[in-house]
Amino acid sequence: MIIIKGKPVAKNRPRFAKRGKIVVAYSDQETESGKAYLQILEQVRGVEPLTGALFVEISFFIARPKSHFGTGKNSGRLKPSSPKYHTKKPDVDNYIKFYFDVMNELVWRDDSQVVSVKACKKYCGPGEIEKTQITIETIKE
């Protein structure tokens, strides 16, 4: 199991800038991908990238906004109207894309090896920190 501490990151759309008469595309997520890469590297150091077909289960734990909690003497309690599921943006597939791209050539040769995915966005429970949790299994032929 791989655990990346910190707020989950979603893949952004490419950005475009005009440099004179030329339009160039760039990614503004190099810092976030570098941080995730280092955390993953620390956990898989010395292990060869996986080969073959893979199944990935990935969970994104996101902090609840303050508006989900009461005020005053109820400040530590969830409001009854608070949603159970994280149905806001970013989309779960954009979270997946970001982490799959970071794990290329580090955890597996290429994310095209992933043939099955189970993913979910969850709110953090009491005392839980924001994180991304990834489990990878090789599928036996």
Image (tube, grey):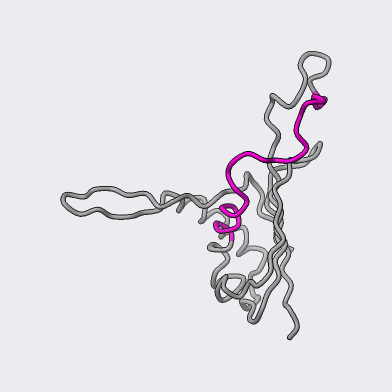
| 101 versus 15 height, above or below | below
Does the stretch in magenta take in 11? no
Task: Residue at 16%, 51% (x, y): give it.
Answer: 21
Quarter occupied by the C terminus: bottom right
Task: Residue at 44%, 51% (x, y): give it.
Answer: 13
Q: x%, y% of residue 9?
A: 57, 48
Q: x%, y% of residue 71?
A: 76, 16
Q: Judge by depth and name the residue closer to the eye, 86 or 63.
A: 86
Q: x%, y% of residue 140?
A: 75, 83
Quarter occupied by the N terminus: bottom right
Q: x%, y% of residue 20?
A: 16, 49
| 141 versus 124 height, above or below | below
Residue positioned most to the top: 72
Does the stretch in magenta take in 80? yes
Q: Judge by depth and name the residue closer to the eye, 102 or 38.
A: 102
Looking at the image, how many numbered discs can be counted on the residues?
0
| 112 versus 3 height, above or below | below
Task: Residue at 63%, 71% (x, y): give it.
Answer: 114
| 26 versus 109 height, above or below | above
Residue positioned most to the bottom: 141
Write down the region rendered in magenta. 76-99
Q: What main secondary structure does the magenta stretch of the protein show?
A: loop
Task: Residue at 58%, 55% (x, y): give it.
Answer: 36
Q: Could you say which quadrant of the image residue 106 lies in?
A: bottom right
